[in-house]
Image (tube, grey):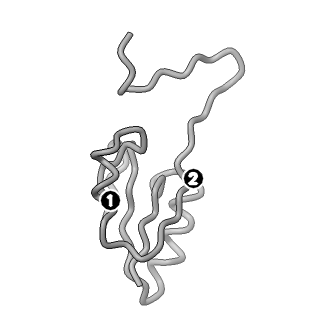
Amino acid sequence: MTIAIIGGAGFVGTRLVSRIATSAIEYSIFDIDQSKLLENMIYLDVEDPESLDKIGGATSIINLAAVHRGEGEVFFSPSTSR
């Protein structure tokens, strides 16, 4: 079994990864946040169809990717032109 953890560098993802890392389960972490350097982490933008090809080979996918907005904040996606 190989698990792809999308959003694995976030709050919930890092806690999940720490649990899975103590098991014999193979996993890969996918996240758009490149500021966090985690072992087994691969850059992935869920809004980019070509980026999703990187998940190939996983037998299971856990999607924890999210867009966070605070009150009054406007979301800007790097893939969206201004």
- Label 2, residues with CA under 10 Å away: few <14, some 14-19, many ≥20: few
Quadrant of the frame with the N terminus: bottom left
Nearest to viewer (mark 2 / mark 1): 1
Q: Position of residue 43 (x, y in %)?
A: 30, 49
Q: Position of residue 63 (x, y in %)?
A: 53, 57
Q: Position of residue 74 (x, y in %)?
A: 58, 17
Point 39% across, 62% down: residue: 29
Disc ID at residue 41: 1
Which residue in the structure is indicated by mark 2?
A: 11
Point 36% across, 27% down: residue: 79
The single residue placed furthest to the top in the displayed view is 82
Q: Nearer the viewer, residue 4 or 73?
A: 4
Q: Nearer the viewer, residue 77 or 33?
A: 77
Point 38% across, 56% down: residue: 30
Q: Secondary structure at mark 1?
A: strand
Please name the amino acid that badge 2 sits on: Phe
Disc ID at residue 12: none
**Mark 2 / mark 1, whichever is N-terminal:** 2
